[in-house]
Image: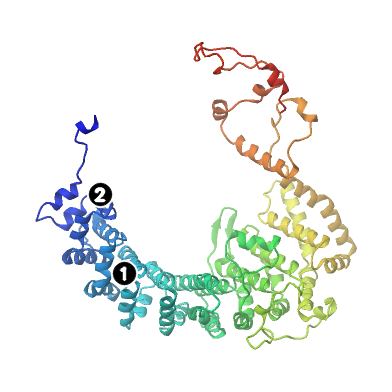
Amino acid sequence: MFWKFDLHTTSHIDQLLDREDVTLRELMEEDDVLQECKAQNRRLLLFLSQDHCMQELVRLITTEPPADLEERSRFKFPNIACELLTSDVSIINDKLGADDSLLEVLYHFLEQDPPLNPLLASFFSKTIGNLIARKTEQVITFLKKKEGFIGLVLKHIDASAMMDLLLRLISCVEPAPLRQEVLHWLNEEKLVQRLTELIHTGKDEERQSNASQTLCDIIRLSRDQANQMQENMEADPLLAVLESQESVAGLLKNMFEGERSEASIVNGTQVLLTLLETRRSGLEGLMDLYSQGYERSYTVSSSILNAIEPHIKDFQQLLLDPPKKSAILTTVGVLEQPLGNARLHVARLVAALLQTNALSICQELCNLSTMDLLLDLFFKYSWNNFLHFQVELCVAAILNHPSSEERPNPGLQNHDGNPAASDPEPQGEAVETGRTSDPQTSIHNALVAHLFQKCQLVQRILDAWEENDKIQGEGGTRRGNMGHLTRIANMVVQNLEKGPVQSQITDLIKELPEDCRGRWESFVDETLRETNRRNTVELVSTHNMHSSSEDDDMESPFPNDLSLQQAFSDYQIQQMTANFVDQFGFNDEEFSEHDENIKIRQFDDAEEEEDIWEEKEMNYATQAKSRTR
């Protein structure tokens, strides 16, 4: 019997605690100290919550370990101390949150000269963040008394842990009234303006990057919170400042003031892109442009667009004359003038601006021939798929813009109800191609006409395709932008069949020179059709998909929309090794209808007097024959 043996194991920590002279370090040496702490070992918690132990734990996470220690063990005790302090045990939280002397030791960590040790900074941020969530009022009261708190955090913003600390202050404070109080405090400290100032030419790139990321996260967090708030709740003051025309204009001034640097352009543009987001970012959010039109979770504030519009020409200049970059060696050769991150971000910004459907923005982009320039880059940098995708989104935004009934007006209005930006009379191209008296529709029609007439989209598609065929015919490599070019061509064809600009595109195709129109029709009917067929059918192998020749004449039992999915699954299975299939599954011959006698081992419950483990040969010919495949 089990009770004959003494199986009860006493933790070694309990044995150590029996000693009067046990030290904190001895306990921290034990492998299960964290487990015992989280398991609410009362004796251990009472020991840890003593004043001298708490002081030592806080000192460990805020003091640089001696440099002469072995590197692998230097931060062992600081790491364990951080885990103990953030183990979410109430007695430790209460002690740390209520003792100002402990909080002062923690706060003193920020008063060091930069740079902070990144590992200690993460321990500090995690500990303070845990207190913000668990002992909110005490910690917020303590921090608000420190006049230089925000300044010290921004002083060390090059450490990503400080960015995390700011975001915890914004997102982890509950209840809602206290959170609103914290937001007003941060706004009074001019947090947004001070972060914006860090995105400036000449500033440290790491500080710029973290400041930009912090602003982007504040925008997303604030909008998420706003979506969850009740209608009568007060608006987020930080978000209001970020979306103001004055704030956006200040950011753009910093980006273009003085000598341009790629870091300030990229980091500033990332903030603008986040402000222009109309749905959650990610592949799903980007790709639903093709399938779901322009349904939005919210509209873009007119103040943002008003601030950006005067600087569109500055972004256009970046496409023409980007910050200088050295030549780089790629897998396809030396690239003397790389595209660069700055121009890629400008392409992303243009795509986002086109998706807002703002009248004056579209007019300015049309006047500057920005799409023509982006298409030049699309074909010049034939291996940069990041750029190709953005240009594809631009074309989709122009061709798939919503009708006047579907357009979200609030985002294109000023607060006084006037249009978001100047409403110039459409001239030249816009007047010729405008098919309605609605100014916005006229501008969008002008953009479509611009795409086909000035940018010569159809001619570019045909020329690029023929050039690629020539290169491949000579044994060369297929160009890297052909996949996106195929999708753009399909987009044009789809909009010729249906869509908001179907009739206009039909007329524009008819206006093409006769030889070009004939090449286009031949391309659509033959080349593009064959390319689409290969892309959807011949990507999978149909070899050995049937067990016998008899099945060739049988109609597939699966619906058409499932057959491709089944084929793809079979394709994936073919990637397995032959040995695996032999060992795990059955081959086709085992399921052949010619083999009607199947020998198996079976339990026979009806014959109770016989040995049920005895091997038997059973004939299931009738049943096997009656089954359909």
Where is mark 2, residue-wise?
32
Where is mark 1, residue-wise?
116
Label 1 sits on a secondary structure element that is: loop
Tell which of 227 and 119 is nearer to you: 227
Residue beneath the point at 43% across and 77% down? 177
How packed is label 2: few (under 14 Cα within 10 Å), some, or many (20 or more)? few
Quarter of the image for residue 128 reads: bottom left
Residue beneath the point at 73% across and 55% down? 486
Where is residue 475 shown, x and y percent of the image?
A: 70, 46
Q: Is residue 339 left or right of residue 35?
A: right
Q: Verify CB contact (< 8 Å) between mark 2 and mark 1.
A: no
Q: Is residue 180 left or right of residue 463?
A: left
Q: Report the residue that reaches farthest toward the bottom.
A: 416
What's the residue type where badge 1 is placed? Leu
Q: Report the residue that reaches farthest toward the top.
A: 610
Where is residue 497 shown, x and y percent of the image?
A: 83, 60
Where is residue 192 shown, x and y percent of the image?
A: 46, 80
Tell which of 522 and 493 is nearer to you: 493
Where is residue 585 shown, x and y percent of the image?
A: 58, 28
Label 2 sits on a secondary structure element that is: loop
162 to 27, vertically: above or below: below
Mark-to-mark CA distance, 2 and 1: 30 Å
* The N terminus sits in image quarter: top left
| Image color mode | rainbow
Total numbered badges shown on the rendered structure: 2
What's the residue type where badge 2 is placed? Asp
Residue beneath the point at 70% across and 18% down? 622
* The C terminus sits in image quarter: top right
The reply to whether residue 314 is in sight is yes
How packed is label 1: few (under 14 Cα within 10 Å), some, or many (20 or more)? some
Dot 2 or dot 1, earlier in sequence: 2
